[in-house]
Amino acid sequence: MRFAARLEYEMQLLLFTPETSGGLLIAIPAEEADELLARCAALGQSAWVVGEVVEGEGIEVV
């Protein structure tokens, strides 16, 4: 895993804490994001788009 140089160590650690990783993140096709966000809003559930999957090697957090 590579992190952008501007990300402080503490910010990097957030990816590995129980409160900010695992079951709290999901991945769906980009074309379904608006529908999911609308459904979450209708249920009173907060949801955000926090990134995207792109072609390449490994994981790079920017």
Image (cartoon, rainbow, N blue to C red):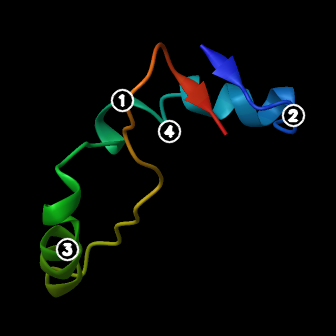
First in sequence: mark 2 or mark 3? 2
First in sequence: mark 4 or mark 3? 4
First in sequence: mark 1 or mark 3? 1
The quadrant where residue 55 appears: top left
Q: CA distance from mark 4 to mark 3?
A: 19 Å
**Other-residue count near label 3 (Cα within 10 Å), few / some / many at <14 / 14–19 / ≥20:** some
Q: Does residue 13 appear left or right of residue 31 in this picture?
A: right
Q: SS of the residue at dot 2?
A: loop
User: Residue at 40% across / 61% down in the picture?
Assistant: 49
Q: CA distance from mark 1 to mark 2?
A: 21 Å
The residue at which mark 3 appears reads as 40
* Percent of width and height locating residue 2: 67, 18
Q: CA distance from mark 4 to mark 2?
A: 18 Å
Q: Are marks 4 and 1 in contact (CB under 8 Å)?
A: no
**Other-residue count near label 2 (Cα within 10 Å), few / some / many at <14 / 14–19 / ≥20:** few
Looking at the rendered structure, the kind of residue marked 2 is Glu
Q: SS of the residue at dot 4?
A: loop
Looking at the rendered structure, the kind of residue marked 1 is Gly
The quadrant where residue 3 appears: top right
Looking at the rendered structure, the kind of residue marked 3 is Cys
